[in-house]
Image (cartoon, helix red, strand yellow):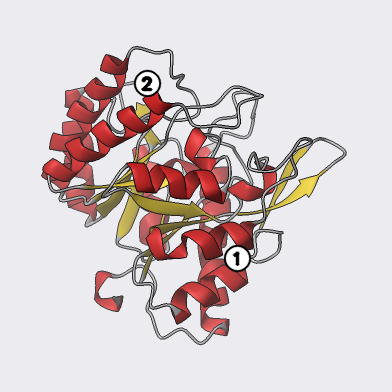
Amino acid sequence: MLLTGIGDEAANSLEGQLQATKELNWQYLEMRGLEVPGFIKANFHDIPEAAFDFTVRQLESAGVDVYCFGSTIMNWAKRLEDPFEQTLAEVRRAIPRMARLSTKYVRIMSFKPGDDEYKIPTEVFRRVKDVTNMFLDAGLQPVHENCMNYGGMSWQHALELLDKCPGLKWVFDTANPIFNPDRSKPKPWPKQDPWEFWTQLSSHVVHIHVKDATWNPAKNDADYNWPGEGQGRVRDILKDSLAQGYDGALSIEPHMVVVFHDSQSKATADAALRKNYIEYGRRLGKLLQEMNTPELPGKESSS
């Protein structure tokens, strides 16, 4: 097992993301969005080729590897009504970039459902299967996240998606069930149970996002917490994953300073992001030590 984190939770700038990684003595980043000098912030598979080349050189100079592409492929900002060619273009951009960086995993999703939807349309299965096969054919492993998407509507929906898309694996986010409705149940939909979702999907999980949160009814949204201090059952899930022999990565996604998909968030200063990210990583390391894990977080040799 090793520790890593989603880069733009540490800093908007590439420089800040690398600094945070080195300060934690980690070897890997999960690349999502970043700012490169002279270019606007964009997802790693969408930045211009010149910006990507610059990023590769900086990663190599810093001795940092990319464990996973946190792509926007079919994510919560995409609709099933969007032309599928847009998705295919994202996949075609991502594949050679993953190959160049020797990155095995790419996070994908399955489009955002309508507010009242509770079934996965057939077209979703077709598109996710096609994307899955494109990555698999290139020797890469797509992993689907339980988030605000069709496959994340409940653990039953997740298993249905996996069944219809052979070869697809799962990236489990410990906090996402806290704010997602369980659309497998009658209305009014209750929120999902992180532990129940984990136990049903754990055999398919090859990557874990560590995030913790507490549901706040007063604001009808989640408050984000340090790992193990919210309702995400982080301690229980990590303990169970280790008992099952999980040997993948734990990737931190604090959300405490800035939420990636919250356009209203004002706390975007790299210094604030980096400070929180580093503290979050250290707290996760301490949590693992308390669980008597023998791993040395962050380094490939710890596997």
Q: What residue is pinned by disc 2?
A: 40
State the residue in front, 123 or 193: 123
Q: Picture coordinates of residue 102 (x, y %)?
A: 15, 51
Please tell me which residue is depicted at 88% across the width and 38% down the height of the picture: 218
Looking at the image, is 110 positioned above or below residue 56? above
* Amino acid bearing label 1: Val
State the residue in front, 24 or 9: 9
| Mark 1 vs mark 2, CA separation in Å | 35 Å
Please tell me which residue is depicted at 20% across the width and 39% down the height of the picture: 133
Quarter of the rendering occupied by the C terminus = bottom left
Q: Is residue 122 visible?
A: yes
**Mark 1: few/some/many CA within 10 Å (<14, 14-19, 20+):** many
Q: Picture coordinates of residue 208 (x, y %)?
A: 44, 58
Q: Is residue 7 visible?
A: no
Quarter of the rendering occupied by the N terminus = bottom left
Q: Picture coordinates of residue 42 (x, y %)?
A: 37, 26
Q: What residue is pinned by disc 1?
A: 234
State the SS at label 2: loop
